Image (cartoon, rainbow, N blue to C red):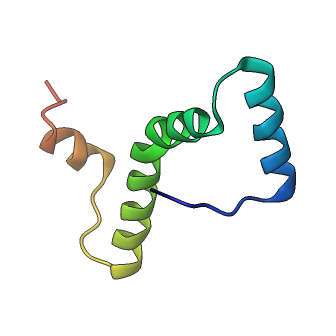
Amino acid sequence: MLSVPLNPDIERRLSELSKRTGRSESDFARELIEGNIEDLEDRYLAEKAIAEGGPRLTSEQVRKELGLDD
């Protein structure tokens, strides 16, 4: 179980959406989390990598490592 405090405006909008569609607020929260977790992981892992330093690669080096160059 997860309890998340929301901004009152967001809470109102979520409640209205729930009433208008007949879906639960939990359904929408689940959909939002599942649809965005990968982007959040990418963002925060990238920010961490930048903050910690380490090797920097050019786009050409990345393409080569990923096998995208012919």
The vertical placement of 63 against 3, above or below, is above
Hey, which residue is sitting farthest bottom in the picture? 52
The front one of 34 and 47 is: 34
Residue displayed at 34% across by 70% down: 49
Residue name at image x 16 percent, y 38 percent? 66
x, y percentage for residue 38? 39, 44
Give the quadrant of residue 46: bottom left
* Quarter location, residue 22: top right
Quadrant of the snapshot with the N terminus: bottom left
The image shows residue 45 at horizontal and vertical percentages of: 36, 63
Please tell me which residue is depicted at 46% across the width and 52% down the height of the picture: 40
Decide which of 33, 17 is in the foreground and name it: 17
Query: In the rendered image of this protein, does residue 3 appear above or below residue 64?
Result: below
In percent of the image, x 73 and y 19: which residue is there? 21
x, y percent for residue 29: 58, 41
Quadrant location, the C terminus: top left
Left or right of residue 13, residue 5 in this image: left
Residue 52: give x, y in percent of width and height: 34, 80
In the figure, is residue 33 to the left or right of 15? left
Which corner quadrant of the image does residue 6 belong to?
bottom right
Number of marks drawn = 0
Give the camera-side residue of 33 and 57. 33
| Location of residue 47 with respect to 1 vertically, above or below | below
Side (left or right) of 37 relative to 9: left
